[in-house]
């Protein structure tokens, strides 16, 4: 049996479910950012993954020896993030707006045309960010999806697909 991270609003972030069938495991080696983006999109509706999707930071897959570090929630685009940034800036005081714009990952949105993978650490969002998430856009700063429900993006981050491809060894999809 394969251990898969799951999460529901209001539940602890480290809730673990058990899949009855093995998932489809896609190694990132040899994949292009476009092919990986298409793969995540194919398993999503309205930007949200419809299957359980796990991001593996290394090659040790869910063989029972360890749990996955991240759940993939879906994807978003630079255009959605720029729209969210514009709305957020309108609501902030000038000092807070300047601090937000001063973050390197926010500054890069203006030039970006990339898609982003939206993921959440199973450790929750109160912990320090792991190195593989450096440069990610936090849901604390911007809405990663338009029309996100309450708590839907708690602890989530958006990492551009190219960076996700380099920092994670594989993505696994299961029903």
Image (spheres, rainbow, N blue to C red):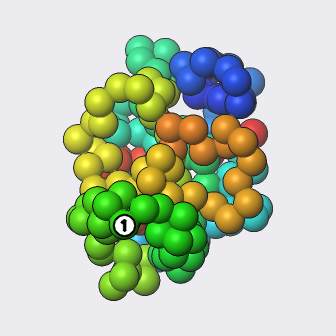
Q: Where the C terminus falls, by quadrant? A: top right
The residue under the point 47% across, 62% down is: 92
**Is residue 5 in sight in this rendering?**
yes
Image quarter (top left, top right, bottom left or bottom right) of the N terminus: top right
Residue found at the very far top of the displayed protein: 65
Mark 1: secondary structure: helix
Label 1 packing within 10 angstroms: few (<14), some (14-19), many (20+): few
**Residue 98, above or below 140:** below
Q: How many marks?
A: 1
Instruction: Name the foreground residue: 9 vs 27.
Output: 9
The image shows residue 72 at horizontal and vertical percentages of 55, 46
Q: Nearer the viewer, residue 111 or 163?
A: 111
> Image point 30% across, 74% down: which residue?
108
Q: Is residue 163 visible?
A: no
Task: State which quadrant residue 66 falls in.
Answer: top left
Coordinates of residue 4 in the picture (x, y in percent):
60, 27
Q: Is residue 55 left or right of residue 76?
A: left
Name which residue lies at 50% across and 37% down.
Answer: 155
Does residue 83 appear left or right of residue 105 in this picture?
A: right
Q: Is residue 119 left or right of residue 66?
A: right
Residue 38 is situated, as x and y percent measured from the top left of the image, at 58, 71
Residue beneath disc 1: 94
Task: Give x and y (percent) for residue 28.
Answer: 38, 56
Which is nearer the eye, 57 or 100?
A: 100
Q: Taking 32 as reference, is 104 left or right? A: left
Report the residue at 49% width, 15% height from top: 64
């Amino acid at each position: 049996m394969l251990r898969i991270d799951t999460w529901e609003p209001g539940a602890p972030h480290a809730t673990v479910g058990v899949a009855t069938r093995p998932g489809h495991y896609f190694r990132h080696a040899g994949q292009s950012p476009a092919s990986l983006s298409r793969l995540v999109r194919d398993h999503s509706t309205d930007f949200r993954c419809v299957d359980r999707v796990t991001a593996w930071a290394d090659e040790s897959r869910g063989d029972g020896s360890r749990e996955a570090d991240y759940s993939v929630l879906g994807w978003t685009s630079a255009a959605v993030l720029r729209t969210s940034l514009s709305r957020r800036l309108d609501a902030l005081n000038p000092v807070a707006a300047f601090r937000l714009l001063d973050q390197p990952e926010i500054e890069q949105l203006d030039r970006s045309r990339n898609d982003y993978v939206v993921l959440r650490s199973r450790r929750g969002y109160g912990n320090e960010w792991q190195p593989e998430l450096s440069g990610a856009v936090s849901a604390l700063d911007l809405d990663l999806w338009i029309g996100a429900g309450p708590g839907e993006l708690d602890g989530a981050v958006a990492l551009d697909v190219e960076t996700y491809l380099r920092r994670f060894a594989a993505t696994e999809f299961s029903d």
